[in-house]
Amino acid sequence: MLNFHPHLHGLLADGYWKDGVFTRFLEVALASIEKAFAERVLAQLHKRELITDDDVAQSLSQDHTGFGVWMGDPFHDKESEQFVARYIERAPLALDKLSLQDDIVTYTPLRMVQGTIRWSSCSCS
């Protein structure tokens, strides 16, 4: 079964440039980033009237909101850098496996022999 699992990937520096000097962050507060990310996404969903005040409060009251931030170990070799960069730029779905007919989006995976996975299309702005 295909699950709806929106997520982002990023390749970020572990510091910042100022006056020509790169300074590494001493610490990255992942919990603070995760909280801010959850609050901003939920605020946008609320603004678009896709969720209610109660939905926002309920989600934020949980020990695990469903939002997560992960940071891996730094890498220092070109091969790892290129691998991660290729992974991040990869499209999550192959467009040639998607079709639209009568407001229904159909995704046909390469390995699926019989049938297809179907879900209703939606309009997002």
Image: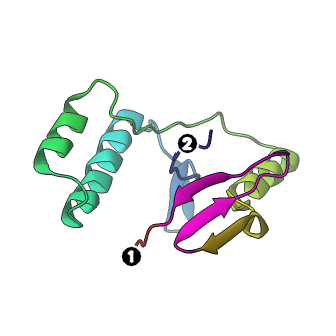
Which is more toward the observer, 119 or 50? 119
- x%, y% of residue 107? 68, 58
Which is more toward the observer, 66 or 15? 66
**The magenta stretch spans residue 97:** no
Depicted 5 relative to depicted 100: above or below: above
> What kind of residue is marked 2?
Asn
Residue at 32% x, 46% y is 38
Residue at 55% x, 74% y is 102
**The magenta stretch spans residue 110:** yes
Q: Residue furthest top?
A: 63
Assign the magenta stretch its main secondary structure.
Answer: loop
Instruction: Work out whether residue 89 can be spotted.
Output: yes
Q: On the image, numbered disc 2 is attached to which residue?
A: 3
Image quadrant where residue 21 sits: bottom right
Is residue 6 shown left or right of residue 66? right
Specify the segment rendered in magenta: 102-121
Q: Residues within 10 Å of mark 1 (few under 14, many from 20)?
A: few
Residue at 27% x, 62% y is 44
Image quadrant where residue 119 sits: bottom right
Residue at 46% x, 37% y is 26
User: Is the N terminus in the top left, top right, bottom left or bottom right quadrant?
Assistant: top right
Which is more toward the observer, 22 or 88? 88
Q: Compare marks 1 and 2 and give the one earlier in the sequence.
A: 2
User: Is the C terminus in the top left, top right, bottom left or bottom right quadrant?
Assistant: bottom left
Mark 1 and mark 2 in contact? Answer it, CB < 8 Å.
no
Is residue 6 shown left or right of residue 52? right
Q: On the image, numbered disc 1 is attached to which residue?
A: 125
**What is the spatial separation of the Cα atoms under label 1 and label 2, in whole angstroms?**
21 Å
Q: Residues within 10 Å of mark 2 (few under 14, many from 20)?
A: few
Instruction: Work out whether residue 11 can be spotted.
Output: no
Tag 2's secondary structure? loop
